[in-house]
């Protein structure tokens, strides 16, 4: 199998850029929403609950974005080290189809399934 490393690197950089921009947008929205929430002293309890849910959802999205950004950075490092496309557990090649779907994958599909099962 021959992996087009330049293509994968460009995909990873583009994905990193888009994810960073989305996380930044969420963060800016949280800051603006926080200013509005503080000014709404007579807020109805249902509105308050909705605002709390939205904040918690945004925090979860930011946390997940941070996790994926770290995985992208790790994949870029594997490209530089020459280990991109090799499963970190079994050492077998990760199929091109998997890398096309998840360009930051560090595990083959079998090892990823085992990891998810615990």
Image (cartoon, rainbow, N blue to C red):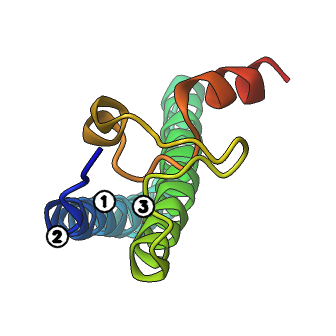
- Name the residue nearer the viewer: 116 or 111: 111
Q: Secondary structure at mark 2?
A: helix
Residue plotted at (57% across, 41% down): 92
Within 10 Å of disc 2 (Cα), the crowding (few <14, some 14-19, many 20+) is: few
In primary-sequence order, the first of circles 1 and 3 is: 1
Eye-nearest disc, 1 or 2: 2
Residue plotted at (24% across, 65% down): 5
Relative image position of residue 117 (x, y in whole percent) = 78, 17
Residue 45, quarter of picture? top right
Eye-nearest disc, 1 or 3: 1
According to the image, label 2 marks what residue? 6
Eye-nearest disc, 3 or 2: 2
* Left or right relative to 4: residue 99: right
- Name the residue nearer the viewer: 105 or 83: 83
Q: Return the residue found at the far bottom.
A: 80
According to the image, label 1 marks what residue? 19
In primary-sequence order, the first of circles 3 and 2 is: 2
- Name the residue nearer the viewer: 22 or 104: 104
Q: What distance separates the C-alpha of mark 1 from that of mark 3?
A: 17 Å
Relative image position of residue 61 (x, y in whole percent) = 48, 47
According to the image, label 3 marks what residue? 30
């Amino acid at each position: 199998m021959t992996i087009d490393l330049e293509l994968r690197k460009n995909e990873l950089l583009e994905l990193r850029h888009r994810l960073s921009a989305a996380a930044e947008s969420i963060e800016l929205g949280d800051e603006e929403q926080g200013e509005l929430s503080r000014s709404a002293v007579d807020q109805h309890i249902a509105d308050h609950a909705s605002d709390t849910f939205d904040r918690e959802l945004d925090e979860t999205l930011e946390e997940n974005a941070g996790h994926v950004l770290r995985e992208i950075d790790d994949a870029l490092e594997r490209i530089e080290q020459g280990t991109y496309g090799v499963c970190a557990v079994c050492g077998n090649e990760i199929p091109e189809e998997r890398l096309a779907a998840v360009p930051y994958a560090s595990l083959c599909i079998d090892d990823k399934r085992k990891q998810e099962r615990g």
